[in-house]
Image (spheres, rainbow, N blue to C red):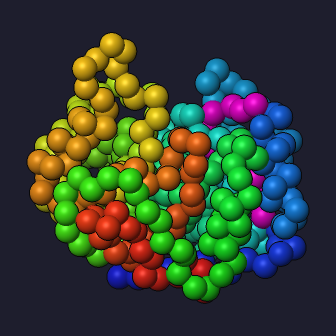
């Protein structure tokens, strides 16, 4: 079962100290600085010079990235943690996070950052599935405002609307999940959060339809769809098979239909042109017929 209490984080205030970290892949400096500028208009941003490190496909070695992330999570003076980029690398840090006691605060990121979100939910904490810094500067002001509201307001987040009903029905439960590929890599490890009764959020990028099918089937064989109550599908970007007579959306719809669970697709969450931030760990209501995801609890207190 899920932890008895998944704790909301203390609401941020303008001028609070926040940290930028790079726990996964290296990143483009200009895109990072654009995103940094967005949050620096509201908060005091700190980051270590080691954030610019590169080691193959990682933002520096595991020791550097783990130390940076652990320090930011544990420091009570840091009120929020913003991830520079996804890519790959957070799975390599999970074992090292054992023994870290994070002070309650939002961690913001998505894609590969889903592994850290999963760990935080196991620790009983709400986190924010939302833009990484290299993406944030490319998104519009309305997304920035939604993010700041999510961090600072003590009311539930505004609802989101999808574009397609896959399976009709209504379900309530804590919103968990994130990137499909990362989630499947947590199966069989102690880092998958308890999903019993959850509404499962899934999104991905660059995975061809057969790969989406394989990962979804892996979740099915592991019994995940027998444990959850509903499915929210975000963006699946760059997932089409060239010259195919079917789409990734059709494949996902068939897979969702087979579960029999309430499911709606096309929510603006993930690697698409829109990536609206949503709190993970809070209770939500999915009305698949109306393609509406409502947030029943506040992420901040």
Is 87 located above or below residue 138 in the figure?
Answer: above
Nearest the camera: 73 or 273? 273
Asked if one can make out residue 281 in the rendered structure from this viewpoint, the answer is yes
Q: Residue at x 76, y 68 (%)?
A: 78
Q: Residue at x 19, y 57 (%)?
A: 167
> Quick check: 288 left or right of 207?
left
Nearest the camera: 74 or 238? 238
> Quick check: 100 left or right of 59?
left
Asked if one can make out residue 6 in the rendered structure from this viewpoint, the answer is no
Point out the image quarter for the N terminus: bottom left
Give the quarter of the image for residue 104.
bottom right
Residue range in magenta is 18-28
Q: Residue at x 38, y 67 (%)?
A: 292
- Where in the figure is residue 185, as x and y percent of width and height? 35, 40
User: Is 19 colored magenta in this rendering?
Assistant: yes
Give the quarter of the image for residue 85.
top right
- Where in the figure is residue 61, as x and y percent of width and height? 66, 32
- Where in the figure is residue 22, as x and y percent of width and height? 69, 43
Point out the image quarter for the C terminus: bottom right
């Amino acid at each position: 079962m899920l932890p008895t209490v998944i704790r909301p984080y203390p609401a941020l205030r303008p001028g609070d100290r926040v940290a930028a970290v790079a726990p996964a892949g290296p990143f483009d400096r200009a895109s990072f600085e654009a995103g940094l500028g967005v949050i620096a208009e509201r908060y005091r941003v700190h980051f270590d010079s080691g954030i610019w490190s590169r080691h193959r496909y990682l933002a520096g070695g595991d020791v550097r990235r783990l130390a940076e992330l652990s320090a930011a999570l544990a420091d009570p003076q840091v009120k929020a943690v913003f991830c520079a980029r996804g890519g790959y690398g957070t799975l390599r840090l999970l074992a090292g996070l054992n023994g870290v006691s994070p002070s309650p605060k939002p961690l913001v990121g998505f894609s590969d950052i889903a592994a850290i979100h999963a760990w935080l939910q196991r620790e009983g904490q709400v986190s924010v599935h939302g833009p990484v810094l290299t993406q944030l500067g490319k998104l519009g002001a309305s997304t920035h405002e939604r993010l700041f509201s999510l961090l600072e307001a003590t009311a539930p987040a505004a609802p989101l609307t999808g574009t397609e009903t896959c399976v009709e029905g209504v379900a309530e439960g804590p919103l968990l999940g994130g990137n499909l590929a990362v989630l499947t890599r947590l199966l069989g490890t102690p880092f998958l959060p308890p999903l019993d009764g959850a509404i499962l959020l899934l999104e991905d990028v660059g995975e061809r339809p057969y790969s989406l099918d394989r990962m979804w089937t892996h979740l099915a064989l592991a019994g995940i769809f027998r444990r959850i109550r509903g499915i929210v599908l975000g963006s699946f970007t760059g997932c089409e098979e060239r010259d195919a007579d079917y789409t990734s959306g059709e494949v996902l719809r068939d897979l969702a239909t087979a579960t029999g669970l309430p499911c709606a697709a096309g929510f603006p969450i993930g690697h698409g042109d829109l990536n609206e931030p949503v709190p993970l760990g809070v209770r939500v209501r999915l009305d698949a017929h109306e393609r509406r995801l409502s947030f029943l609890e506040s992420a901040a207190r």
